[in-house]
Image: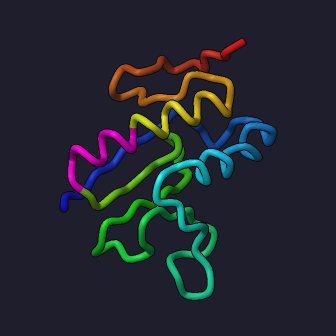
Amino acid sequence: MELQECNLNIRYDLPKEIWDKVPLVYEKMEGWIGFGKDGKGENGIPYWFSYNDNEKSIFASVEPSGLHFVARMELNEWLKWKSDVKKVATQILKFKVGEIEEGDVGHDIEWIK
């Protein structure tokens, strides 16, 4: 397994109405196990597959650069999961979700009507 990372353009300063929908995105993703609590993972952090970062796992955190995902998994599985999260987030949040660094999206939010 390899360490994988990405930043999505789901920025910390988006309106509350957007952030209220982000947990719906989390729940729709393969491997969702919930938010860390009671000694499993870090409190309030979303996790997929495992709370243990020595196993196949994904967690996310909100950073100034956007919603940051860190995964420990094989590259081909990661690429599919990452593609899926972008699609699901775009559908639920109603704007094009992608990676600025990868050229998926620009710096401005492209709202879907």
The answer to whether residue 53 is left or right of residue 48 is left
Task: Residue 70: say if magenta.
Answer: no
The answer to whether residue 101 is left or right of residue 15 is left
* Vertical side of 33 occupied by 80: above or below: above
Q: What is the residue that sits farthest to the bottom in this orientation?
A: 39
Image location (x, y in percent) of residue 11: 59, 38
- The residue nearer to you, when weighing 100 against 30, is 30
Image location (x, y in percent) of residue 6: 37, 43
Q: What is the residue that sits farthest to the right in this orientation?
A: 17
Task: Residue 81: say if magenta.
Answer: yes
- Identify the residue at horizontal 73%, vertical 37% (top origin): 18
Q: Look at the image and tell me in which quarter the N terminus lies.
A: bottom left
**Bounds of the magenta span?**
74-82
* Vertical side of 32 occupied by 91: above or below: above
- Identify the residue at horizontal 52%, vertical 45% (top origin): 67
- Identify the residue at horizontal 57%, vertical 18% (top origin): 108
The answer to whether residue 12 is left or right of residue 31 is right
Q: What is the residue that sits farthest to the top in this orientation?
A: 113
- Identify the residue at horizontal 52%, vertical 56% (top origin): 61
Q: Colour scheme in the image?
A: rainbow
Q: Look at the image and tell me in which quarter the C terminus lies.
A: top right
Image location (x, y in percent) of residue 84: 45, 37
Image location (x, y in percent) of residue 106: 48, 17
Q: How many marks?
A: 0
What is the chief secondary structure element of the magenta stretch?
helix
